[in-house]
């Protein structure tokens, strides 16, 4: 399903970034894709996709 119609970003794209790059927030997601840079209505759905994809805290990047 398309999450960001403006940039053509799908839920699968976001899930892949969470699993492969440890993306855990919209801020981190925006470092990889231009999500929310046009109208911004996709950010809530994108955060839901991130939250639903995270299965445990080991997916988060070490921020310390």
Image: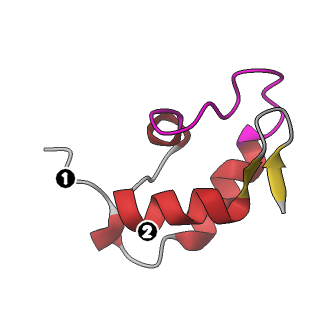
Left or right: residue 62 versus residue 55 is left
Left or right: residue 40 versus residue 26 is right
Q: Residue at x 38, y 77 (%)?
A: 56
Query: In the rendered view of the protein, which quadrant contains the C terminus?
Result: top left
Left or right: residue 52 versus residue 61 is right
Secondary structure state at the residue bearing disc 2: helix
30 over 19 or under it: above or below = above
Mark whose residue sits in front, 1 or 2? 2
Q: Position of residue 58 (x, y in %)?
A: 28, 71
Left or right: residue 1 versus residue 28 is right
Q: Which residue is mark 2?
A: 19
Q: Position of residue 17 (x, y in %)?
A: 48, 57
Q: Residue at x 48, y 39 (%)?
A: 32
Q: Residue at x 62, y 30 (%)?
A: 34
Label 2: few (<14), some (14–19) or many (≥20) C-alpha neighbours in 10 Å: some
Q: Estimate the spatial distance between the alpha carbons at disc 1 and disc 2, rounded to whole Å.
A: 14 Å
Residue 40's quadrant in the figure? top right
Residue 12, magenta (yes or no) = no
Q: Position of residue 62 (x, y in %)?
A: 19, 53
Q: Position of residue 48 (x, y in %)?
A: 69, 58
- Magenta span main SS: loop
Q: Which residues are magenta?
A: 30-43
Secondary structure state at the residue bearing disc 1: loop
31 over 53 or under it: above or below = above
Q: Which residue is mark 1?
A: 62
The reply to whether discs 1 and 2 touch (Cβ–Cβ < 8 Å) is no
Of 38 and 44, the residue lying toward us: 38
């Amino acid at each position: 399903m398309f999450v960001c119609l403006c940039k053509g970003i799908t839920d699968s794209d976001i899930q892949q970034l969470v699993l492969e790059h440890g993306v855990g927030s919209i801020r981190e997601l925006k470092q990889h894709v231009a999500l929310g840079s046009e109208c911004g209505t996709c950010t809530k759905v994108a955060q839901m996709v991130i939250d639903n994809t995270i299965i445990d805290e080991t997916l988060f990047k070490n921020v310390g």
